[in-house]
Image: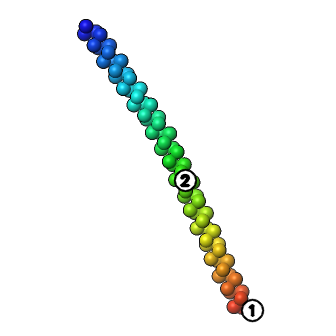
Amino acid sequence: MTEMLENAWLIFLIFVERCAAALANVAIIVHTWLIGLVIIQFTLIMRKRDENRRQKSGDRNQNRRSVEH
């Protein structure tokens, strides 16, 4: 009887460990996906800022040219 309980306990521990490993794998996948989203959003924000800076500097250059003429 004791041996059956020990075997059952061991099987339960192995099951819990496998569940934890599966959850860890899911967590790694979600974490990687979220990092990808952060990188994409950061890239989009920086592109937008660069675009706005170029437009502002272009407007300044046009204003300087119109003042000179």
Give x and y (percent) for residue 41.
55, 56
Tell which residue pokes out farthest to the left in this image. 2
Tell me which amino acid carries mark 2. Ile
**Where the C terminus falls, by quadrant?**
bottom right
Task: Report the number of discs.
Answer: 2
- Above or below, comparing residue 68 to residue 40 in the picture: below
Identified at 51% across, 44% down, the residue is 32
> Which residue sits at x=67%, y=77%?
58
Determine whether the residue tagged by mark 1 lies in a helix, strand or loop: loop
**Number of other residues with Cα within 10 Å of mark 1, as a class: few under 14, some 14 to 19, many 20 or more:** few
Asked which quadrant contains residue 1, the reply is: top left
Q: Name the side, left or right, on which 55 lies relative to 2.
A: right
Relative height, residue 26 to residue 35 (above, below): above
Q: Describe the element under mark 2 as helix, strand or loop.
A: helix
What amino acid is labelled 1 in the image? His
User: In the image, 13: left or right of 34?
Assistant: left
The circle drawn on residue 69 is 1
Q: Which mark is residue 15?
A: none
